[in-house]
Amino acid sequence: MKKIFISLVSLFIVLIISSCGGGAGIPINYRSTEITIDGKSDEWGTELKQIPDQKIWLGTTNDDKFFYLCLVTEDRIKAMQMMRNGLITWFIPTNNSDAAFGIKYPMPNKMPKREEMMNLGREMFQPENLSKLVDMFLEKQNEFQVLNKDKFSLSLLPLENKDGIKLKIGYTENKFVYEMKVPLAVHEDYTFQIAALPGEDVKIKFETEQNEMQAGRSGGMMQGGGGQMGGNRGGGTGQMRGNFPGAGIMQSFEPLNYSTTIKLALPKWNFSYLRENEN
């Protein structure tokens, strides 16, 4: 009984601290099902919520040791943008912004060779060809970068690593899916952790960067019609030139820059759990 009482008091203190910590974050659900990082969104169900003004859905959850994330889009241009320019996912603890770090994956400049892309031609944005393109792209993506808050590289890690970070991209049923699993600040064996515990707030930010051409270059490298997927725009010829078919399409799209603050979920304690673990 003494152990049960101590556990209840400890839980009560945690709840009080979390409720008095400002409460700015949007509460998320504690993980209720097994999540396999496989580039599929089947397990996420109603956890996926649409990002305002974006054709992107985001799901987040956590347990007592890890944070899980799923990003889904049916927008083929957004998918190409993330693959071509790379995507940085930032984790910024609200109580310790200096401990912020980012995971850069996909890595930019690792697209398939131009010859391989040209074989797909103008129809690259059709669902069946985009699936082939993603498959080619994933063959080049076997590592990710960990950045500090100033965007300096801290480490370059393989997808298969011993640091507890798991990443996977998939494209099924016309959906581009990006899944991620990252350790929380409860581990001793992992180098990179989100510096937050269940009940605390974390800011999550997604950022795609502009490549050199989008940032200001002009000329033949950026020419090309096709303002719509596989079509012409403004009387253009529809011919696509540049590093790969569709380079002109990418020119006019703003980089993704979205952030949200979440409150990591606390476990759902119950008396039966306490009784089972009193010894």
Image: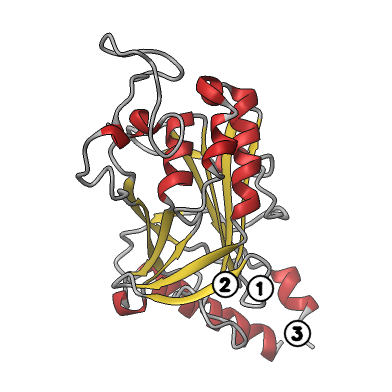
Helix, strand or loop at mark 2: strand
Q: CA distance from mark 1 to mark 2?
A: 7 Å
Which residue of the protein is positioned furthest toward the bottom in this rendering?
2
The front one of 145 and 183 is: 145
Query: For this view, does 2 lie left or right of residue 180?
Result: right
Q: CA distance from mark 2 to mark 3?
A: 41 Å
Let me know if residue 174 appears in the view. no
Let me know if residue 166 appears in the view. yes
Q: CA distance from mark 1 to mark 3?
A: 36 Å
Q: Residue at point 43% right, 53% down?
A: 87
Pointer 3 local density, CA inside 10 Å: few below 14, some 14–19, many at least 20: some
Residue position marked by numbered label 3 in the rendering:
278
Pointer 2 local density, CA inside 10 Å: few below 14, some 14–19, many at least 20: some
Q: Is residue 150 above or below residue 130?
A: below
Query: For this view, does 269 lie left or right of residue 89?
Result: right
Measured as percent of width and height from the top left, residue 197 is found at 49, 74
First in sequence: mark 2 vs mark 3:
2
Residue position marked by numbered label 1 in the rendering:
161
> What amino acid is at disc 3?
Glu
The front one of 243 and 265 is: 243
Residue position marked by numbered label 2 in the rendering:
157
Q: Residue at point 43% right, 58% down?
A: 89
First in sequence: mark 1 vs mark 3:
1
Pointer 1 local density, CA inside 10 Å: few below 14, some 14–19, many at least 20: few
